[in-house]
Amino acid sequence: MKKTLRLRYFAILREQRGLDEEAFTTGSSTAAEVYEELRALHKFTLPSERLRVAVNGDFAPWSAAILDGDALAFLPPVAGG
Amino acid sequence: MKPVDFRLTDRPIDPSALLAGLADTRAGACATFEGRVRDQNDGRAVGSLDYEAFAPLAEKEGGRIVGEAREKFHVIGALCVHRTGSVALGDISVWIAVTAEHRGAAFDACRYIIDEIKARLPIWKKEHYAGGASEWINCAARGPGGDPPAPARKMK
Protein backbone atom coordinates (compact mmCIF):
# COMPACT_ATOMS: atom_id res chain seq x y z
CA MET A 1 0.00 0.00 0.00
CA LYS A 2 1.31 3.45 -0.89
CA LYS A 3 2.20 5.81 1.91
CA THR A 4 3.37 9.39 1.91
CA LEU A 5 6.38 10.25 4.05
CA ARG A 6 8.07 13.49 5.05
CA LEU A 7 11.80 13.27 4.37
CA ARG A 8 14.65 15.41 5.68
CA TYR A 9 18.23 15.42 4.47
CA PHE A 10 21.33 16.78 6.16
CA ALA A 11 24.86 17.81 5.18
CA ILE A 12 26.20 15.87 2.18
CA LEU A 13 22.82 14.21 1.52
CA ARG A 14 21.08 17.59 1.50
CA GLU A 15 23.57 18.85 -1.07
CA GLN A 16 23.34 15.71 -3.23
CA ARG A 17 19.53 15.87 -3.16
CA GLY A 18 19.49 19.64 -3.71
CA LEU A 19 16.87 20.28 -1.03
CA ASP A 20 16.49 19.78 2.69
CA GLU A 21 13.00 18.29 2.87
CA GLU A 22 10.28 16.86 0.68
CA ALA A 23 7.18 14.69 0.65
CA PHE A 24 7.71 11.24 -0.85
CA THR A 25 5.19 8.59 -1.82
CA THR A 26 6.42 5.02 -1.69
CA GLY A 27 5.46 1.37 -1.50
CA SER A 28 8.51 0.56 0.62
CA SER A 29 7.82 -0.92 4.04
CA THR A 30 11.05 -0.26 6.00
CA ALA A 31 13.40 2.69 6.46
CA ALA A 32 16.15 0.71 4.70
CA GLU A 33 13.97 0.14 1.63
CA VAL A 34 13.08 3.82 1.48
CA TYR A 35 16.74 4.79 1.55
CA GLU A 36 17.68 2.29 -1.17
CA GLU A 37 14.90 3.70 -3.34
CA LEU A 38 16.16 7.25 -2.77
CA ARG A 39 19.78 6.27 -3.27
CA ALA A 40 18.99 4.84 -6.69
CA LEU A 41 16.89 7.89 -7.61
CA HIS A 42 19.36 10.55 -6.49
CA LYS A 43 22.73 8.80 -6.78
CA PHE A 44 23.57 9.26 -3.11
CA THR A 45 27.20 8.26 -2.57
CA LEU A 46 26.83 6.90 0.97
CA PRO A 47 25.48 3.38 1.60
CA SER A 48 22.98 2.91 4.41
CA GLU A 49 25.66 1.15 6.52
CA ARG A 50 27.36 4.53 6.85
CA LEU A 51 24.19 6.38 7.87
CA ARG A 52 21.67 6.42 10.66
CA VAL A 53 18.00 7.08 10.28
CA ALA A 54 15.62 8.94 12.55
CA VAL A 55 11.90 8.20 12.47
CA ASN A 56 9.52 10.76 13.95
CA GLY A 57 12.31 12.63 15.72
CA ASP A 58 14.41 9.86 17.25
CA PHE A 59 16.98 7.30 16.13
CA ALA A 60 15.44 4.10 14.75
CA PRO A 61 16.75 0.82 13.34
CA TRP A 62 16.88 0.52 9.57
CA SER A 63 14.42 -2.36 9.90
CA ALA A 64 11.80 0.00 11.38
CA ALA A 65 8.40 -0.41 9.73
CA ILE A 66 7.28 2.79 8.03
CA LEU A 67 3.73 4.10 8.29
CA ASP A 68 1.84 6.67 6.28
CA GLY A 69 2.70 10.18 7.53
CA ASP A 70 6.00 9.22 9.18
CA ALA A 71 8.87 11.70 9.21
CA LEU A 72 12.22 10.21 8.21
CA ALA A 73 15.58 11.97 8.52
CA PHE A 74 18.72 10.53 6.96
CA LEU A 75 21.82 11.22 9.02
CA PRO A 76 25.30 11.06 7.42
CA PRO A 77 28.34 10.12 9.54
CA VAL A 78 28.43 12.72 12.32
CA ALA A 79 31.29 15.13 12.96
CA GLY A 80 30.59 17.17 16.07
CA GLY A 81 33.14 18.52 18.49
CA MET B 1 12.62 21.46 37.21
CA LYS B 2 15.41 19.53 35.55
CA PRO B 3 18.22 21.86 34.41
CA VAL B 4 19.01 22.11 30.72
CA ASP B 5 22.35 20.33 30.39
CA PHE B 6 22.90 20.69 26.68
CA ARG B 7 22.33 23.52 24.23
CA LEU B 8 22.98 24.44 20.63
CA THR B 9 23.79 28.04 19.78
CA ASP B 10 24.51 29.96 16.61
CA ARG B 11 26.25 32.70 18.63
CA PRO B 12 29.86 32.80 19.91
CA ILE B 13 30.28 30.84 23.13
CA ASP B 14 31.20 32.90 26.22
CA PRO B 15 32.73 30.55 28.81
CA SER B 16 32.78 33.06 31.67
CA ALA B 17 29.04 33.64 31.47
CA LEU B 18 28.37 29.90 31.30
CA LEU B 19 30.70 29.11 34.20
CA ALA B 20 28.89 31.57 36.44
CA GLY B 21 25.82 29.35 36.12
CA LEU B 22 27.75 26.39 37.54
CA ALA B 23 28.92 28.13 40.73
CA ASP B 24 28.35 25.76 43.66
CA THR B 25 30.22 25.82 46.96
CA ARG B 26 29.95 22.00 47.27
CA ALA B 27 32.20 21.65 44.21
CA GLY B 28 35.90 21.31 44.87
CA ALA B 29 36.66 20.80 41.18
CA CYS B 30 35.57 22.21 37.85
CA ALA B 31 36.91 20.65 34.64
CA THR B 32 36.27 22.40 31.35
CA PHE B 33 36.95 21.42 27.76
CA GLU B 34 36.98 23.73 24.74
CA GLY B 35 36.97 22.36 21.22
CA ARG B 36 38.36 25.04 18.92
CA VAL B 37 38.52 25.45 15.17
CA ARG B 38 42.01 24.54 14.01
CA ASP B 39 43.73 26.09 11.00
CA GLN B 40 44.55 22.79 9.32
CA ASN B 41 43.24 19.24 8.95
CA ASP B 42 45.05 16.35 7.26
CA GLY B 43 47.60 18.75 5.83
CA ARG B 44 45.05 21.13 4.29
CA ALA B 45 44.79 24.76 5.34
CA VAL B 46 41.33 25.37 6.84
CA GLY B 47 39.76 28.82 6.54
CA SER B 48 36.48 28.30 8.40
CA LEU B 49 33.94 25.66 9.43
CA ASP B 50 30.20 25.33 9.10
CA TYR B 51 28.24 23.17 11.53
CA GLU B 52 24.81 21.89 10.57
CA ALA B 53 22.65 20.15 13.17
CA PHE B 54 19.41 18.19 13.26
CA ALA B 55 18.50 20.48 16.12
CA PRO B 56 15.63 18.69 17.90
CA LEU B 57 17.45 15.35 17.92
CA ALA B 58 20.85 16.91 18.72
CA GLU B 59 19.31 18.57 21.78
CA LYS B 60 17.67 15.32 22.82
CA GLU B 61 20.84 13.23 22.31
CA GLY B 62 23.09 15.88 23.90
CA GLY B 63 20.84 15.91 26.94
CA ARG B 64 21.01 12.12 27.14
CA ILE B 65 24.82 12.18 26.97
CA VAL B 66 25.16 14.69 29.79
CA GLY B 67 22.56 12.73 31.75
CA GLU B 68 24.63 9.55 31.34
CA ALA B 69 27.72 11.38 32.64
CA ARG B 70 25.70 12.46 35.68
CA GLU B 71 24.73 8.83 36.32
CA LYS B 72 28.20 7.35 35.81
CA PHE B 73 30.24 9.85 37.79
CA HIS B 74 29.77 11.84 40.98
CA VAL B 75 28.87 15.05 39.23
CA ILE B 76 27.39 18.16 40.82
CA GLY B 77 26.82 20.29 37.72
CA ALA B 78 27.37 19.71 34.01
CA LEU B 79 26.78 21.74 30.88
CA CYS B 80 27.66 21.29 27.22
CA VAL B 81 27.14 23.89 24.49
CA HIS B 82 27.75 23.21 20.78
CA ARG B 83 27.94 25.78 18.00
CA THR B 84 25.98 25.70 14.79
CA GLY B 85 26.53 27.84 11.69
CA SER B 86 29.80 29.37 10.57
CA VAL B 87 32.62 29.27 13.15
CA ALA B 88 35.87 31.17 12.62
CA LEU B 89 39.39 29.89 13.18
CA GLY B 90 40.29 29.80 16.85
CA ASP B 91 36.69 30.12 17.97
CA ILE B 92 35.07 27.60 20.29
CA SER B 93 33.01 24.94 18.55
CA VAL B 94 32.05 22.97 21.66
CA TRP B 95 32.32 23.84 25.34
CA ILE B 96 31.89 21.50 28.30
CA ALA B 97 32.12 22.10 32.03
CA VAL B 98 31.64 19.64 34.86
CA THR B 99 31.75 20.39 38.56
CA ALA B 100 32.23 17.72 41.20
CA GLU B 101 33.46 17.35 44.76
CA HIS B 102 36.78 16.00 43.51
CA ARG B 103 38.85 16.29 40.34
CA GLY B 104 38.62 12.63 39.24
CA ALA B 105 34.89 12.71 38.59
CA ALA B 106 35.11 16.15 36.96
CA PHE B 107 37.82 15.05 34.49
CA ASP B 108 36.18 11.68 33.78
CA ALA B 109 32.75 13.13 33.15
CA CYS B 110 34.15 15.88 30.93
CA ARG B 111 36.05 13.30 28.86
CA TYR B 112 33.00 11.06 28.64
CA ILE B 113 30.84 13.90 27.35
CA ILE B 114 33.22 15.05 24.59
CA ASP B 115 33.87 11.49 23.40
CA GLU B 116 30.15 10.68 23.21
CA ILE B 117 29.36 14.03 21.58
CA LYS B 118 31.85 13.28 18.81
CA ALA B 119 30.44 9.79 18.25
CA ARG B 120 26.70 10.37 18.60
CA LEU B 121 25.52 13.95 18.20
CA PRO B 122 23.67 14.47 14.88
CA ILE B 123 25.77 17.41 13.77
CA TRP B 124 27.93 17.78 10.67
CA LYS B 125 31.04 19.77 9.91
CA LYS B 126 31.97 21.25 6.56
CA GLU B 127 35.52 22.51 6.23
CA HIS B 128 36.32 25.34 3.86
CA TYR B 129 39.89 25.26 2.62
CA ALA B 130 42.25 27.88 1.33
CA GLY B 131 41.67 28.02 -2.44
CA GLY B 132 37.88 27.62 -2.20
CA ALA B 133 37.38 23.84 -1.92
CA SER B 134 35.18 22.43 0.86
CA GLU B 135 34.36 19.03 2.26
CA TRP B 136 31.94 17.36 4.67
CA ILE B 137 34.08 15.64 7.28
CA ASN B 138 33.68 11.83 7.61
CA CYS B 139 31.44 11.71 4.52
CA ALA B 140 33.89 10.55 1.84
CA ALA B 141 32.19 7.82 -0.20
CA ARG B 142 35.16 5.47 0.08
CA GLY B 143 37.98 5.10 2.51
CA PRO B 144 40.34 2.23 3.25
CA GLY B 145 38.34 -0.99 3.33
CA GLY B 146 35.11 0.91 2.72
CA ASP B 147 35.36 2.66 6.07
CA PRO B 148 35.62 6.40 6.54
CA PRO B 149 39.22 7.63 6.48
CA ALA B 150 40.88 6.89 9.80
CA PRO B 151 41.41 10.05 11.82
CA ALA B 152 45.22 10.14 11.76
CA ARG B 153 45.34 12.84 14.36
CA LYS B 154 47.65 13.07 17.28
CA MET B 155 46.37 14.19 20.63
CA LYS B 156 48.03 17.43 21.55
Image (spheres, helix red, strand yellow):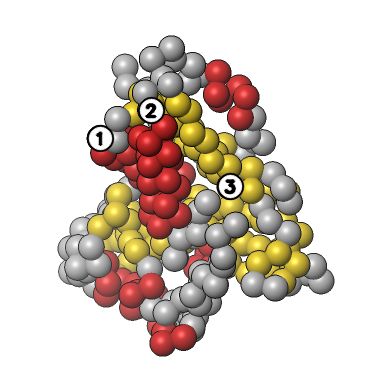
Q: Quadrant of residue B153?
A: bottom right
Coordinates of residue B89 in the picture (x, y in percent): 73, 51
In the rendering, which numbered label is found on residue B102?
A: 2
Which residue is located at x 32 percent, y 56 percent?
A54
In the rendering, which numbered label is found on residue B100?
A: none
Which residue is located at x 43 percent, y 21 percent?
B28
Compared with B12, A23 (above or below) is below
The residue tagged 1 is: B71
SS at mark 1 in the image: helix
Residue type highlighted by circle 1: Glu
| Labels 2 and 1: the sequence-earlier one | 1
The residue tagged 3 is: B35
Coordinates of residue B20 in the picture (x, y in percent): 55, 18
Distance from the alpha carbon under mark 2 to that under mark 1:
16 Å
| Crowding near the residue tagged with mark 3, few <14, some 14–19, many ≥20 C-alpha atoms within 10 Å | some
| Labels 2 and 3: the sequence-earlier one | 3
Residue type highlighted by circle 2: His
| Crowding near the residue tagged with mark 1, few <14, some 14–19, many ≥20 C-alpha atoms within 10 Å | few
